[in-house]
Amino acid sequence: MRIELERRPDVSKLFSILSPFIALGLTIFFGGIMFMLLGKDPVSALYSFFIEPLMEVWSLHELAIKAAPLILIAVGLSVCYRSNNWNIGAEGQFIMGAISGSILPVVFYEWHSPLVLPLMMVLGMLGGALFAGIPAFLKAHLNTNEILTSLMLVYVAQLFLDWLVRGPWRNPGGMNFPETRTFDASAILPEMIASGRAHWGFGFAIIAAILIWFMMRYTLKGFEITVLGQSERAGRFAGFSSRKMIWFSMLLSGALAGLAGIAEVSGAIQQLRPVISPGYGFTAIIVAFLGRLNPLGIVVAGLVLALTYLGGEAVQVSLQISDKPIRVFQGLLLFFVLSCDTLIHYKIRMMWYDLTKTTGEGAR
Amino acid sequence: MGIFEAILLTVITAATPLVLAAIGELVTERSGVLNLGVEGMMVMGAACAFIATQQTGSSYVGILAGIASGALFSLLFGFLTLTLVANQVATGLALTILGLGVSGMIGEAYVGQSGIKLPQIVFPFLSDIPFLGALLFKQDLIFYLSIALVAGVHWFLFRSRAGLKLRAVGDSHSSAHALGINVIRTRYLAVMFGGACAGLAGAQLSLVYTPQWAENMSAGRGWIALALVVFASWRPWRIVAGGYLFGAVSISQLYAQAFGIGIPSQFLSALPYLATIVVLILISHNRRTTLINTPAALGKSFVPDR
């Protein structure tokens, strides 16, 4: 059997919309098989993975808390990926944003003012943007591959955070635990609505998604991003600078990842610890692709991926299995998303017999 | 055995997985495919090699399991990027995420078990050579394989007809296709070779470097291997030089920690990653030489027109 691709004359509108859903369906199907192999009832496992977290008000709040960083980061990444800049170090920018935003509540903890919180957010964005500025500078001016440099910096950021919370920023009254002092009330991001824990990070995520969606759709900048991403040469003829685009997209995605970092720390954790992210920066890559690099699609995709985190925690309790299936789910999902995207540009034909056998190799 | 020899031995052990994963990725990239999933294939190899060794009691079965799992896992990447022409960068990332997840799941029951260390193969007489003997002729099978693979890949790429075809595919898939070379088949084989090597590198981690299984035990080595290929400007023997350089950097931080130099351990642990960045800058800041060395079709999908 052979599989052949035939390019469609036009991009398929139908599959542009359907492909993420097909991918999700396939992931759930194979996820069920995975639970069966683990010796669990697939229906009840999938139920507690995907449905149960949606049934209670408190868990909907948890969903919003987990979706916030994913959406914020993924929206920034979508601009990067559309312009063909492969920032995969958002996890590091998230951490550096969290660190630089925490300077105020950890180092200047005696300063209480309504200004603290906005300043923290700005510092967080600055920290993330500056950290993303390193691979941006290296790519734009020294021709260095941004994939590898941005990824290497993730490890550097993780180690830097580890050093801070064990060393200079350790809570003096914290029984030697590796964590900073807990933030003052004036440095904690408030809840959005009274019914639960979900903080303003989710609000930021929605606002960012709408703004970036508007930019991509209605502004010259958005057009510039798309053109440079599809053909650098065409962009040059239009007078767009790909070097400036590297800076723009990397700094933007870094700033959003940094905002996600400080919002998570200030809203959900309320102190710094050696590990502050269950891989949000990497999961956001999946979110970006599942949302088809469209900011509004990313909001939905962010909620879906947040659900896998919650569902993972739920099955840990209800089925006594580990949190490992979460990663497998997420990986499978990205795989199916990428393969279903082929349907948008190509028709797939299965060739059940090999033409070359009858016509000879030379005929091809 | 002196302290110097002991240090060099640890450098070799740290360098071998880097060399192995990088030489596989070099062949893949020479065929025009950028597989960013090295980290995922490596960690799968490590898990499968350890599990197979624990199940059968033979570390040689473990090595085979590592190689096979890496190759099979890379087929997934091949199917997506070659048959379905999915984006290579994104698919490579997916492979890494999936590999870390699956290996964590299947290896969970084996965490904390002490494994069997791969036995040494001692060459008679040669191993008695002072200094060099202990370093080069009293090693395990995977070390010998790593050197043989580098030599073999060098011969294959630059001395054999099939290697010439592979490089042609990597430089211009359309021309190669017009010449009657089966581009997709060549790339599938190259991707699987890369996967097998990454799996073997993983086996080295869980059978030699630290004979046990721990989640994420590849710790970014797959990514360093990717950087090594760039560092080596896609030439096999330079992989060895680069690999041993990186091995030395990662070992030096261990010794610096052991001797209690007044630098926080986290900064020392960051050294290999920072070194990778520095090396990448040094190698690629000259646009022209980079352009000459890089396989011209690297990362580009090929759909044969019929």
Image (spheres, rainbow, N blue to C red):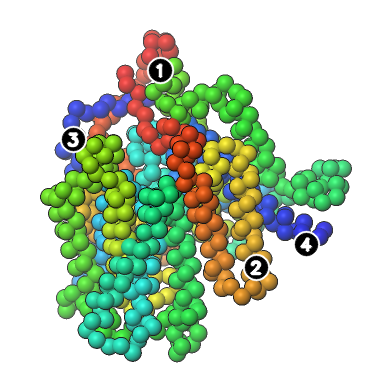
Q: Amino acid at mark 1?
A: Ala
The residue identified by callout 2 is B256
Q: Could you tell me how far apart the alpha carbons at marks 3 and 2 are, in whole angstroms?
A: 58 Å
Q: Are discs 2 and 4 both within one chain?
A: yes
Tell me the residue that label 3 is attached to: A12
Q: Chain of mark 1?
A: B
Q: How far across and down, in percent of the image, does residue B277 sit?
A: 49, 54
Instruction: Identify the amino acid type marked 2.
Output: Ala
Q: Residue at x 50, y 31 (%)?
A: B189
Q: Nearer the viewer, mark 4 or mark 3?
A: 4
Residue shown at 47% from the left, 57% from the top: A152
Instruction: State which mark lies toward you, 3 or 2.
Output: 2
Tell whether A257 sits left or right of A357.
left
- Residue B178, disc: 1
Q: Which mark is residue B3?
A: 4
Which chain's residue wears label 2?
B
- Near mark 3 (Cα within 10 A), the count class, few <14, some 14-19 or many ≥20, is some
**Spot occupied by residue A53 in the image (x, y as percentages of width and height):** 26, 65
Circles 1, 4 touching at the beta carbon (< 8 Å): no
Q: Which is closer to the viewer, label 2 or label 1?
A: 2
Query: Where residue A71 appears, x then y in whole percent?
Result: 26, 60
Circle 3: element type? loop
Judge if badges 1 and 4 mark residues of a common chain: yes
- Tell whether B252 sits left or right of A291: right
Q: Mark 2 to mark 1: distance in Å?
A: 56 Å
Answer few, some or many: residues within 10 Å of disc 4's Cα (few below 14, many 20 plus, some between 14 and 19): few
Q: Are marks 2 and 4 in contact (CB under 8 Å)?
A: no
**Gap in Å between the C-alphas at discs 3 and 1?**
30 Å
Question: In the rendered structure, the residue with mark 3 lies on which chain?
Answer: A
* Badge 4 amino acid: Ile
Label 1 packing within 10 angstroms: few (<14), some (14-19), many (20+)? few
Residue shown at the point (38%, 67%) measured from the top left:
A95
